[in-house]
Amino acid sequence: MLARMKILTMIMMSLAAFASAQDIHFSQYYSAPLTINPALTGAFAGDYRAGLNYRTQWGSVTVPYRTFDLFADFNIGRRIISRNFWSVGMIALSDKAGDGGLSVTKIMGSGAYHFILDAGKRNDLSFGAQLGWVQKSVDFSKFYFDNQWNDTGFDTGMPNGENFVKGSYGYADVAAGIAYAYSGPKRFSANAGFSVFHLTKPQDSFYDDDNHLGIRPTINVGITYKISDVLSVSPSVFYQSEKKAHEFLGGAMVKYSLKGSEDPYVTTGNIYMGLYGRFGDAFIPVIGYELRNWRLLMNYDFNTSELKPASNGQGAFEISLIYVATSKKNKGIRIDLPCPRF
């Protein structure tokens, strides 16, 4: 029993230490566009968009990680500019986990400029940037350390031997990205993007050391092919890396339209079903439903990594809700971005 307790404690401490360096991420990368590329600010068919993402994981090992993402973005200048236009947005993220209440709060302002490259408005090249503030905190008094093990249990009255000097700190953060989207005349559309986060490599540590975040490049690529008037498939991949950590996700989503609509950007009922994988870590089934301007997606990550024995195969639950709309004054005259609906 004590051996199992010690193993679980070591796992929790490892997770806490790793979390101080990892970035907030979602399996539904396609539902959290501002977290993967600033150039995707305003990359939707409409005037304004708002979204919410929620993720919980590691509930079988420690106090669960709970992550929230709230974002909104707007397209401006479409009425007065014949082709190119600006987009602005904001994203607020919160992540809290573990017995020590390790928390990360991030607020970023985001902006992008979209170049419509042809008269048919089928090719779009976008440049974006983000600037904001990140705050991190933890309660070290709630942790157990190896120096406090007395051969029968943990004694929190014993010195922990750690050299941490602060329970909270903050830093400014900067990101930039580029994205391309193509919409074919019939059944095919595609998109790709590249972005770089932590451009200033901010210092990131609760300890008195010189640890800095590594620059984190990301790549996303996807296509949408309309098989019929009611059925389409959207395969995509997403990759990011930071120092020695790598994440590669890929899969496909199928959309089935229950009923058509005269406006191709306002649906009256779509069903989504997909299967994705985080290579070396989890496979991720997804289901969802879209009604007019609202889209709801849910997924569960089934753990397949080496931590499967500790997690009992349990992974993460995630849900997203996105609303996209066009103002009444712009209906009929808007400039639609040539990007996939999904």
Image: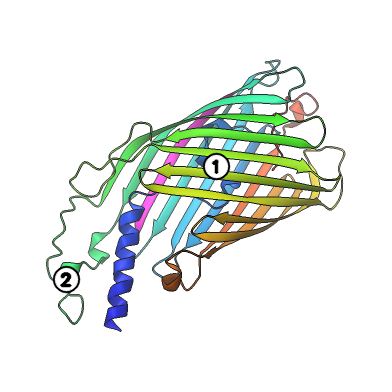
Find disc 2 in the rendering and name its residue.
148
Secondary structure that dominates the magenta span: strand
User: Could you tell me if the residues under marks 2 and 1 are in contact, i.e. CB atoms within 8 Å?
Assistant: no
**Amino acid found under the numbered disc labelled 2:** Gln
Mark before the other along the chain sequence, 2 or 1: 1
Taking 267 as reference, is 117 above or below it? above
Taking 75 as reference, is 11 above or below it? below
Q: Tell me the magenta residue range.
A: 100-113
Residue 53 in the figure: left or right of residue 240: right
**Amino acid found under the numbered disc labelled 1:** Phe
Categorize mark 1 by other alpha carbons within 10 Å: few (<14), some (14-19), many (20+): many
How far across and down, in percent of the image, does residue 290 sit? Answer: 74, 51
Q: Residue at horizontal 55%, vertical 50%?
A: 249
Q: Residue at horizontal 17%, vertical 50%?
A: 165
Q: Secondary structure at mark 2?
A: helix
Q: Residue at horizontal 52%, vertical 40%?
A: 36
How far across and down, in percent of the image, does residue 214 sit? Answer: 34, 39
Find disc 1 in the rendering and name its residue.
71
Q: Secondary structure at mark 1?
A: strand
Residue 319 in the figure: left or right of residue 207: right
Query: Quarter of the image containing the C terminus?
Result: top right
**Observer able to see residue 314:** yes
**Observer able to see residue 44:** no
